[in-house]
Image (spheres, rainbow, N blue to C red):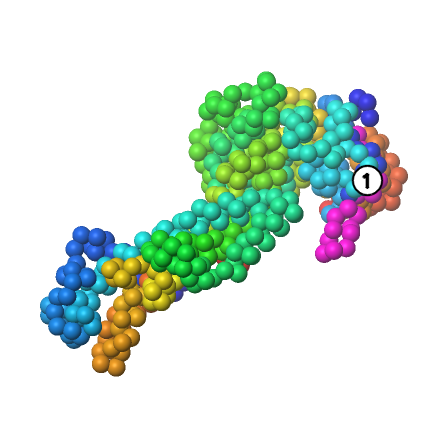
Amino acid sequence: MNGSLMATQGAEVTYRRSGRPFVALHDVTFRLAPGERVGVVGGSGSGKTTLARLLLGLIRPSAGTVSFRGQRVDGLPERLLGDLRAGASMVFQDPNSSLNPRMEVGDIISEPLRSPRLRRRGDLPEVSPEAVRAALESVGLDPATTSRFPHQLSGGQRQRVAIARALVSDPEALVADEPVSALDVSVRAQVLNLLSDAVTERGLALVFISHDLAVVRHLCERVVVMQQGRVVEEGAVDDVFADPRHPYTRQLLEATLSI
Amino acid sequence: MRRANLVVGGVLIAVIVSMAAVGLFWTPFSPTAISGPRLAPPGWPHVLGTDGQGSDTASRIISGAKLALLVGVMSVSAAALIGVPVGIIAGMSHRWVAAILSRGADILYGFPALLLAILFAAAVGGSTWTAVAAIGIATIPVFVRIARAATMQVMSQTFVEAARLSATPPLQVAWRHVLPNIAPVLGVQVSVSFGLAILAEAGLSYLGLGSGSDVPTWGRMLREAQNELFNAPLVALWPGLAIAMATMGFNLLGDGLRDLLDPKLREIA
């Protein structure tokens, strides 16, 4: 686990679904090195999002460990997760639900800057209109957007706001959970380019969850294929795509080609 | 027709509120003095007639509106100020804290306003304030329940997870994320509770558990009219009508507001 930024070791996640336990992740060992870009692919229900939430300490594993910069973070109470919260952020799938409908864009973006626990890091920008404007400009939004509410923006603009919020605290790792699948096809490429540029410029480590293999190929160095809560194949993007070993990976690749 | 509730409710409440506002400064006659013959029929100068003592009914109705609204405002705002924070805490807490708070609210729910009013009247003597306290306390659990249910719904949304990732302290989550999003549901409940509070106040003063005998209230007027019900049934009609108008007005307004809201929230409220 040494040297990895985010990692899980033999992690198992069990949900209780109407009283009956349901295992969402089986024995998943995952590693993300600093600056590395990893794609996580798989069908719906394969455990991709669960893995993302696990890495960020939003849920706890029922077995195994989760760590950030080599420190265990599973089982820690929220107030001791300062390092993780300051060092990693997330872009959610659907900006309609990940932005508070009753908060102005400026307040949404500056929320991480206002956190006393993140401020302990010391190098955060001050909470100021300038910081918000810079964040808005960095995602290609008009500074006047700051006083808008999310419902006054288009889907693509909303996801840009979500990306600005994720980047404003200058994290080391970004987890993007199908960041464009809720968007219009016409704006997907723009948002993906924005994300890709931000990751490259800032040297971010990226966990990119997607079912779009072409995008993963373009954006990531390594890919992890998941099926029914298990990692069934992983490796360098080029290797896996050129020579898929697992039948499920082949199936995914064929499905993409046939579209 | 969806707005009909809102309009009718609004008009009824506007009538009551303007009566109360006028009553602060002016009534045709003194609401407590004897100003004419007993049980005069509606006419001039006693527009709604006089009661069994010879007091002007219209003046007493106007004066009673003031008290009804006062009791409504005091008891509902006290109940909301206590119940909403407790409900939000319960909705944001882990299982056992939430369970304790909710069971506490359930226990309180077991004490109807009437029982509390009898208790207070026995302990310190009935007054406007014991009526406010009894109605207020009995209304707290309603706000706890509704605030908790609405909070739980907000807490399950992704933007709360995003706030967690931003290391936003719980108090800020409650203030910036939960409260603004549950405010519409609470607004509906305030309106409905207001109508119920006015009804409860009338009930308590009808039973003599509320304001003192020198204060004209709709409930007291109803009780006094009861003695003359067969001689002068109209005397009972006016306070009854006023109570019905106020209660229905706030209920219709609440229903109308609810219809304006997201249908998802309608299930909670």
x%, y% of residue B191? 40, 56
* Foreground pick, A155 / A7: A7
Image-based side of B176 in relation to B231, left or right: right
User: Which of the 4 image quadrants contains residue B44?
Assistant: bottom left
Q: Which residue reaches farthest front?
A: B123
Image-based side of A54 in relation to B87, left or right: right
Please give the chain letter of the residue carrying mark 1: A
Tell me if residue B21 can be seen. Answer: yes
User: Callout 1: helix, strand or loop?
Assistant: strand
Q: Is A43 within the magenta?
A: no
Q: For the residue marked with disc 1, what is the amino acid?
A: Ala
Magenta span covers which residues?
A14-31
User: Which of the 4 image quadrants contains residue A185?
Assistant: top right
Compared to residue A95, the image places residue A237 above or below, namely above
* Foreground pick, B114 / A254: B114
Compared to residue B122, the image places residue B166 above or below, namely above
Q: Is A26 within the magenta?
A: yes
- Report the residue at 45% width, 62% height from top: B115
Secondary structure character of the magenta stretch overall: strand
x%, y% of residue B210? 34, 60
- Residue identifier under label 1: A63
x%, y% of residue A90? 64, 33
Image-based side of B119 in relation to B165, left or right: left
- Report the residue at 82% width, 26% height from top: A1
Compared to residue B70, the image places residue A131 above or below, namely above
Q: Which residue reaches farthest bottom?
A: B230
Compared to residue B156, the image places residue B4 above or below, namely below
Image-based side of A182 in relation to B126, left or right: right
